[in-house]
Image: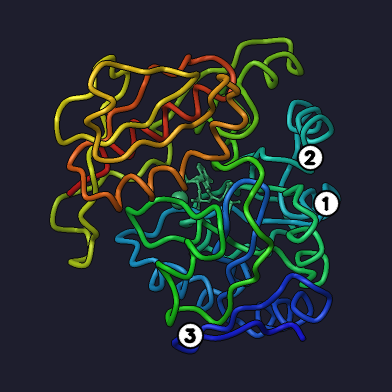
Amino acid sequence: MAQTGSMGGTRHLAADAAGLAEAARLLREGALVAFPTETVYGLGADAARAEAVAGIYAAKSRPRFNPLIAHLPDTAAARAQGAFDAAAERLAAAFWPGPLTLVVPVGPGCTVCDLARASLDSVALRVPAAPVARALLAAVGRPVAAPSANRSGRISPTRADHVAADLDGRIAAILDGGPTDVGLESTIVACLPGAPLRLLRPGGVPREAIEAVLGTPLGTDMHAGARPVAPGQLASHYAPRARVRLDAETIWPGEAALVFAGARPPGLDRALAVAELSGDGDLHEAAANLFAALRTLDASGAAMIAVSPIPPAGLGEAIRDRLARAAAERP
Ligand code: TXA
Ligand code: MG
């Protein structure tokens, strides 16, 4: 039995053969289905259908039409959508399937609709590694546009119940594949003609691993495609959420604490809530725990989440990026 339950019209599907088949059928019909990737849960829609893609923005209450990532089951399917230069081919060979997104020029056979690309002449392509995602994408047989399956401005979901908390009643189904492995979104690299290779977003593949494959440093352009958040543009139901303070060496009264690598800062005993990213300083474990820990600490009602120092190398760059955004993305 694929269906494990339903709430507010949203069906909760188990990630078995029947659940996958039903999720694929719904996506092909133009419905919205949340599904697990190895990074975070995505809110999927048929990338070729503008009305389905418009549903993503509506369900997330996204204030703007950002370009979305199109998900494919394998590199061959990705090549059918975009133009891969030598660097893009090298990165695809090294990191796909996996938590890397490539922004490449639109190819002649591209079926990703204008709305999903925000009318750009480039397209963001990703071949996820999670077996549930790959099986689903193969069954759908078309690119699936999928941003993270949270309401706009909230924390990205790493478990099916995180998705349900934000989107139950707003989407057709949630495919439950358990907790995600990586825990934060894919790394985005732009491979576009006439411009140096650029890191658009740090993520699940560390910058150093990409630079090692390319044999050259990556430029950084974190503002490309970034959403300028104007006060008043955000939907009125934007959730109150704790602020985030990075590199905290002391926990002040009234704060919640997010600690790393065994840190025991002064004041920790007074913290309203404490979560540990990784006791022994493992950045992979820390990334996997990050968003669930932020949800837990936010639920404590603390106005501020104080975060122990996290080194900026490897996955630390992406972890620090997400924490900085959590601090900044407020109306
Ligand atoms: O791990 C992930 O990447 C997750 C899972 C669900 O796969 N997806 C995800 O999608 O994070 P989304 O829509 O939240 O992120 C899309 C990012 C945005 O920062 C957007 O600006 C950038 O990709 N993007 C998409 N198309 C682009 C383009 N043509 N040029 C530059 N940036 C682009
Ligand atoms: Mg997101």
Q: Secondary structure at mark 1?
A: loop
Asked whether the beta carbons under mark 2 and mark 1 sit within 8 Å of each other, the answer is yes
Q: Quadrant of residue 60?
A: bottom left
Give the distance between the C-alpha atoms of the residues marked 2 and 3, in whole angstroms: 35 Å
The secondary element bearing badge 2 is classed as: loop
Vertical comparison of 294 with 18: above or below? above
* Left or right position of 157 against 111: left
Residue at the far bottom: name it: 9
Q: Mark 2 to mark 1: distance in Å?
A: 8 Å
For the residues marked 3 and 1, what is the alpha-carbon distance in whole angstroms? Answer: 33 Å
Dot 2: within a 10 Å radius of its alpha carbon, few (fewer than 14), some, or many (20 or more) residues? some
Q: Amino acid at mark 3?
A: Met
Query: Callout 3: few (<14), some (14-19), or many (20+) C-alpha neighbours within 10 Å?
Result: few
Can you say which quadrant of the picture contains the N terminus?
A: bottom right
Which residue is more in the foreground, 170 or 139? 170
The furthest residue to the front: 269
Disc 2 or 1, which lies upstream in sequence? 1
Relative placement, left or right, of 158 versus 295 is: right
Q: To which residue does mark 1 refer?
A: 74
Tell me which residue sits at (52%, 61%) in the image. Answer: 116
* Residue at image location 41% in from the left, 68% down from the top: 165
| Residue identifier under label 3 | 7
Kindly identify the residue that appears in the image at 49 percent across and 89 percent down. 9
Q: Position of residue 324 (x, y in %)?
A: 33, 31
Q: Quadrant of residue 89?
A: top right
Dot 2 corresponds to which residue?
Answer: 96
Image position, residue 268 (x, y; %): 28, 25
Tell me: residue 129, above or below residue 56.
Answer: above
Q: Position of residue 247 (x, y in %)?
A: 32, 18
Cβ of mark 3 under 8 Å from ligand 1: the answer is no
- Residue type at the position of mark 2: Trp
Name the residue type under label 1: Asp
